[in-house]
Image: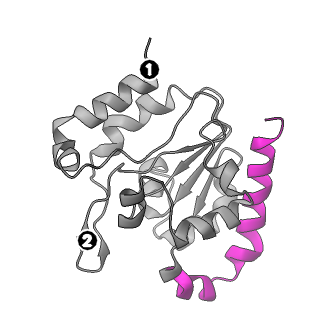
Amino acid sequence: MRSTLDRIRAEIVAHESNAWARDLGYEPLYAAAPGARIALIGQAPGRKAQESGIPWNDASGVRLRSWLGVDDVQFYDPNLFAIIPMDFYYPGKGASGDLPPRKDFAGRWHQRILAELPDLRLTVLVGGYAQKYYLAGRAKPTLTETVRAYAEYLPFTIPLVHPSPLNFRWQTKNPWFEEEVVPALRSLVAEALAGT
């Protein structure tokens, strides 16, 4: 008997809006299991991650795991972390970086998946796309302001800047992120995973 999560995955693969990805041999790049404690909502897989079939399989993922205070084994255990980007497929290259996730994708699939994860204790919103969607009406005018106001969204949600190495200038200009937000994040993650 297939689980609801397995049926949803099959629907995603078969959906007409994802035919182009099927033709390229892409699998939807997300992970979720009923025991997940933390939902990690990012933007969309990068090319390297999509081709490897492993989410956050790049320098951004290394930095993100460092911020979270977890190792690879913990991060890739779907009974600990549900990795649910705003689009489950690499969107392609744009004029300045990767294209954005498709606007209708999260609305079509996220709530159905999240409804199957009853043990979630924390949602980590990585980057502006996830924050605008999940903090609708509560996000600040800029990503920096939203992340700076992280305490307003606790204890169940925390917004982060994207961990891309390309964001080094932002991090240099905003030292409070490493000083304040990262320790708070690690504490929340440890608490959410406690007793697993």
Query: Chief secondary structure of the magenta span?
Result: helix
**Can residue 85 be seen in the rendering of this structure?**
yes
In percent of the image, x 68 and y 74: which residue is there? 177
Q: Residue beneath label 1, please?
A: 4
**Any magenta on residue 179?**
yes
Indicate the amino acid at tag 2: Lys
Q: Which mark is residue 163?
A: none
Judged from the image, the secondary structure of the residue bearing numbered disc 1 is helix
Left or right: residue 104 versus residue 122 is left
How many labels sit on residues? 2
Query: Residue 104, percent across and down?
Result: 27, 45
In percent of the image, x 32 and y 29: which residue is there? 10
Left or right: residue 136 versus residue 123 is left
Query: Residue 115, percent across and down?
Result: 50, 26
Q: Which residues are magenta?
A: 167-196
**Quadrant of the snapshot with the C terminus:** top right
Q: Residue beneath label 2, please?
A: 93
In percent of the image, x 36 and y 48: which residue is there? 88
> 145 or 90: nearer the eye?
90
Indicate the amino acid at tag 1: Thr
> 23 or 109: nearer the eye?
23
